[in-house]
Amino acid sequence: MNTKLHALTDASGRPISFFITAGQVSDYTGAAALLDELPKAK
């Protein structure tokens, strides 16, 4: 069993948010979970 750590970063690469999934789960699942954390565009 393994895990994946999905990270949302700003333009400088600084972390904004993290989401952990099981290793066998699609990367889309982690990406979809982080999309709601994106700041609003200016």
Image (cartoon, helix red, strand yellow):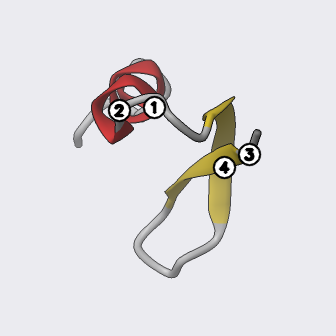
Q: Reading the chain from its start, which is encountered first: label 1 or label 3?
A: 3
Q: Amino acid at mark 4?
A: Leu
Question: Measuring 38% from the left and 23% from the top, which residue is drawn there?
Answer: 29
- Residue 19, located in which quarter of the rendered image? top right
Mark 3 or mark 2, whichever is nearer to me: 3
Q: Position of residue 41 (x, y in %)?
A: 23, 39
Question: Which residue is under mark 4?
Answer: 5
Question: Which residue is under mark 2?
Answer: 26
Question: Which residue is under mark 3?
Answer: 2
Q: Reading the chain from its start, which is encountered first: label 2 or label 4?
A: 4
Disc 1, SS: helix
Question: Which residue is under mark 1?
Answer: 30
User: Would residue 13 be found to the left or right of residue 22 on screen?
Assistant: left
Q: Amino acid at mark 1?
A: Gly
Distance Cα–Cα, label 3 vs label 2: 13 Å
Picture quarter with the N terminus: top right
